[in-house]
């Protein structure tokens, strides 16, 4: 079992600190966004689903993985960071496709054009949706499997930080990921 899946399985409830040590304040400063930056607090700010908690036959259960979501604030915006790991190679971003489409308000055809580009990007290099509100990056893995980070900002595909800063934010958080 990967260290990431162990952390996800140890996450209880839907509140508390993010089990993955992302420093959103440092990331916001690095990309030049001013204002308060830190974790959101309260119900629904941290959640985890694993192959053990997902329903039998679900994509997550079949992939043998986990998804952890953590909510942060940068200035007045809510940033949600999804970290997903699977035992199946080249599968993490595909597993997150419905969430990406929803957060970026992408049509199915737009998602079908964008997703292969994100999946083929060099690990550590983020790809941003056309709206600029969602960034995704695949992380390096030891051995088999796949790990990715999906970062969403704003509501209804509206972003205040813009596509360039979303790309930099996603890559900065990816560099911080540590299990």
Image (cartoon, rainbow, N blue to C red):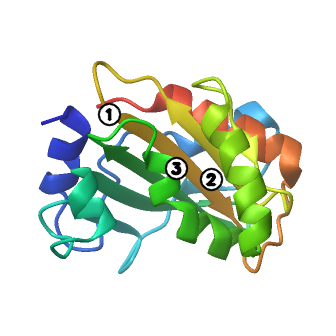
Q: Position of residue 135 (x, y in %)?
A: 69, 49
Secondary structure state at the residue bearing disc 2 = strand
* Badge 2 density bin: few <14, some 14–19, many ≥20, Cα 10 Å: many
Residue in view at x 29 percent, y 26 percent: 144
Task: Report x, y in % for residue 176.
Answer: 49, 29
Could you tell which of marks 2 and 1 lies nearer the N-terminus? 2
Quarter of the N terminus within the rendering = top left
**Spatial CA span between label 2 and label 1:** 32 Å
Q: Which mark is residue 93?
A: 3
| In this rendering, the label closer to the viewer, 2 or 1 | 1
Mark 3 residue crowding within 10 angstroms, few (<14) / some (14–19) / many (20+): many
Q: Earlier in the sequence, mark 1 or mark 3?
A: 3
| Residue to which mark 2 is pinned | 37
**Residue found at x 35% / y 53%:** 18
Of mark 3 and mark 2, the one earlier in the sequence is 2
Q: Residue at x 76, y 75 (%)?
A: 107
**Residue nearer the viewer, 42 or 171:** 171
The answer to whether residue 28 is seen in the rendering is: no
**SS for tag 3?**
helix
Residues under labels 3 and 2: Cα distance? 26 Å
């Amino acid at each position: 079992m990967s260290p990431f899946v162990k952390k996800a399985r140890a996450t209880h409830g839907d509140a508390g600190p993010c089990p993955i040590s992302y420093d959103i304040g440092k990331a916001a400063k690095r990309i030049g966004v001013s204002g308060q930056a830190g974790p959101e607090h309260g119900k629904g700010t941290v959640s985890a689903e694993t192959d053990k908690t997902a329903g039998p036959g679900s994509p997550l259960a079949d992939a043998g993985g986990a998804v952890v979501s953590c909510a942060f604030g940068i200035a007045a915006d809510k940033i949600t960071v999804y970290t997903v790991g699977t035992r199946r190679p080249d599968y993490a971003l595909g597993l997150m496709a419905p969430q990406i489409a929803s957060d970026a308000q992408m049509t199915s055809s737009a998602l079908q054009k964008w997703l292969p580009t994100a999946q083929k990007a060099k690990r550590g290099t983020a790809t941003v949706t056309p709206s600029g509100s969602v960034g995704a990056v695949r992380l390096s893995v030891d051995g088999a499997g796949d790990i990715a980070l999906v970062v969403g900002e704003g509501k209804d595909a509206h972003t205040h930080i813009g596509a360039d800063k979303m790309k930099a934010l996603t890559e900065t958080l990816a560099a911080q990921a540590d299990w």
